[in-house]
Amino acid sequence: MDVIVVGGGAAGFFAALSVREHHPHARITLLERSDKLLAKVRISGGGRCNVTHHALEPRKLANNYPRGGTFLRKAFERFNARDTIAWFAAKGVQLKVETDGRMFPVSDSSNTIVDCLRNAAAEAGVEIRLHAVMQRLEQQGDQGWLVHLGTGDALLADRVIITTGGHPKPTGYDWIGATGHGLVPPVPSLFTFNMPAEPITALMGVVADPARVRIIGTDLESTGPLLITHWGMSGPAILRLSAWGARIIHDLGYRFILQVNWVGGEHEEKLRALLLTESERQGRKQVQNVPVAGLPRRLWLFLLDKAGIDPATCLGDMNKKERNRLVDLLTNDRFTVDGRTTFKEEFVTAGGIPLDEVDPATMQSRKAPGLYFAGEVLDVDGITGGFNFQAAWTTGFVAGHLA
């Protein structure tokens, strides 16, 4: 049996290795359009590679996908985070768990994962062809598929697994659409918020943890660490919000009002009572030296200035209006978002091949027998934290069964 895997990323390598595991005598060819294999793996997690997340129960794991969670549940019964950990351990790569559940190689280097996958593919006898640009797929009846490349070559395969990832533009899926498949239009997911007119960008590098963020006029809300950048806001709270709200935010034209509760969702009444208590305990201290809820000093001074409070004011000398303004900012600060920033090579999309056109038990097309899909080419995307790689490992593994 001849199997062609299209795409040299995480899902592509895992699919090829799964084919070898389940079909020892298959001839496997992996096609990559560029000269860079496993590019996202190499740069993910700041060069450390967030391999998966320590969400070991399939149902709980599936809850971390804004799109595709239900589709993945059955697949996670066959291969999930627990299996990923065991698979890499069997290859000599140990993973560690960080406090937020993210899992990285103990080496803290993505090269460990890249080398593991490339060495495994070499040992499995997977033929890798670089600069292999897909032109079109042609079904050959019972004879499989003819894969036409930009070089003019045509390769015959009994099975084809497509793992080409997400594309920012619909045209990136045109050659797949020619096989009869539809397309859920791609929009960005996992992006940061631009705030070009907001002075808070002067606090770049400051982290508030936890902060609760909401998009005014929607039901979108997220809580977690918030990072202030020189262009706006990032961090897990923002990235999760962008993932769950990818299509809504796209429809808003990436222009909206972001509400920030700097103290993780605490209510006004509790904060007002806290300020009064601290005024009694530390009334002679300057307010600049008594940040609420342990907020970073730079952020605390910024909020005092925004509330019109002299930082040298004694805590006990703050009047009721000043306390109310400060409490309002702590729980209901607002910022104008005007645009987004994505991480180029790490670009994640919401959209792709419609899930109702793919069998979740096999990853085989319901429209074209012998054609399989895995990874981000599907309309599946997860929040930040290793979930997108886990979807790649899982769907690649299942597709490689070639059931």
Image (cartoon, helix red, strand yellow):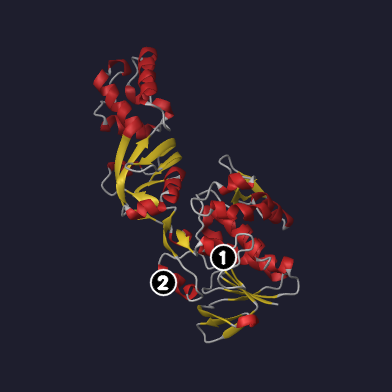
Q: Is residue 301 visible?
A: no
Q: Is residue 2 above or below residue 360?
A: below
For the point 74% across and 56% down, the residue is: 90
The nearer-to-camera label among 2 and 1 is 2
- Labels in figure, total: 2
Residue 162 in the image, given as x and y percentages of width and height: 56, 70
In this rendering, position of residue 359 left or right of residue 120: left
Residue 65 drawn at (x, y percent): 52, 50
**Residue at the spot of label 2:** 171
Image point (28%, 24%), residue name = 324
Decide which of 392, 195 is in the foreground and name it. 392
Q: Residue furthest top?
A: 280
Residue 172: percent from the left, percent from the top? Answer: 44, 71
Amino acid identity at mark 2: Thr
Left or right of 229 in this view: 144: right
Vertical relation: 390 (above or below) 287: below
Instruction: Look at mark 1 in the image and give the residue it sits on.
Output: 9
Q: Tell me the quarter of the image containing the N terminus.
A: bottom right
Q: Residues within 10 Å of mark 1 (few under 14, many from 20)?
A: many
The quarter of the rendered structure image containing the C terminus is bottom right
- Disc 2 to disc 1, C-alpha distance: 20 Å
